[in-house]
Image (tube, rainbow, N blue to C red):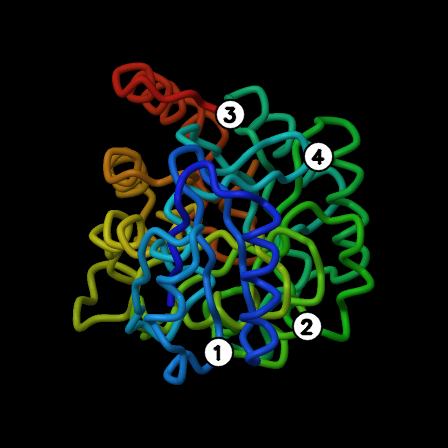
Amino acid sequence: MIIILKQGSNKSEIAKLEENLRANGLKTNLIEGVEKSIIGLIGDTSKIDLDSLYAQDCIDSVQRIQETYKNPNRKMHPEDTVIEAGNVKIGGGSLQIIAGPCSVESEEQIMSTARAVKEAGATMLRGGAFKPRTSPYAFQGLRGEGLKLLLKARAETGLPIVTEIMSADDLPLFEDIDVIQVGARNMQNFELLKELGKTNKPILLKRGLANTIEELLMSAEYIMSGGNKNVILCERGIRTFETMTRNTLDISAVPLLKQKSHLPICVDPSHAAGVISLIEPLSLSSIIAGADALEIEVHCDPKKALSDGGQQLKPEVFAEIMKKIKSLCGYLGRDLG
């Protein structure tokens, strides 16, 4: 349920209203906007007497919400959320480019790639220290040592770090990481999501391989209901009957999520396509669709990559794509970074 407040309402009246609502077992979320302010209610609102609510001088109108997800719901938070990650802001009209290798493999590899993507115009650095792999015999990442190398790359380049977590037990290792990524396979790892909800770290939440948009939003609800409102939704392609690409990028998810949620939207064209030649058109399409960020895989020597070498761009190819991204942003009147 949403309570829309009258403009210029007395703060003491609003505070008293919230107190009364909480006394009835409801959680309240006051959101003060530029044009209007609302109180979002979470809990069993079936017994609320609407007549008594309308009797309050500060209330303009009341709306019921049918969707089970409340916190990421745009109805509860009409204005776009902007999330700060290090020295950048995700959302609010600007575009962030998250670039880097699939896996952190060595100091030389991550440092050279970090320098290259920054020079090309990337605003954040990605890199996997913990790697979920289909085969138990594949490279699983450098783990804690990989995180240390990412921090070293950030110290030199100034790029905020995005890296994936696989277990809540590893959370202490992520204390200095700017954005914690939840991979597609962990989108419904609800115990992990609950623990991330207790932090104040920005969380990049990837859509599962075969999950609906509503299920993605419900996973965001798990994190946000724990108190952490810093969630970035990520469309990374879903599994369909098509076999010519690794996954099928659901480009319609971007504007649809913009309608349904106030949270920033990121698109990962690398995992969606798995085909280097498709990364550029998918990236440009995602920007036009309204994405707030792109996550693109770049490796200094893809042929020697220990994971996903076939979908990682060479730095010079990434630099050429960045030129087109900058040109498109200029045409659309969007800021890059």
- Where is 267 relative to 315, above or below? below
Alpha carbon distance from label 4 to label 1: 48 Å
Element on which disc 3 rests:
loop
Element on which disc 4 rests:
helix
Q: Nearer the viewer, mark 3 or mark 1?
A: 1
Tell me the quarter of the picture where residue 64 sits.
bottom left
**Taking 60 as reference, is 105 left or right?**
right
Determine whether label 3 and label 1 are within 8 Å by CB.
no
Q: Amino acid under label 2? A: Glu
Instruction: Choose between 105 and 15: the one closer to the eye.
Output: 15
Tell me the quarter of the picture where residue 53 sits.
bottom left
Question: Is any atom of residue 208 visible in this view?
Answer: no
Alpha carbon distance from label 4 to label 2: 31 Å
Residue 90, position as x, y percentages in the image: 51, 38
Element on which disc 2 rests:
helix
Name the residue beneath numbered marker 1: 43
Res 111 label: 4
Name the residue beneath numbered marker 2: 195
Q: Nearer the viewer, mark 2 or mark 3?
A: 2
**Taking 135 as reference, is 210 left or right?**
left
N-term-proximal mark, 2 vs 3: 2
Question: Is any atom of residue 152 visible in this view?
Answer: yes
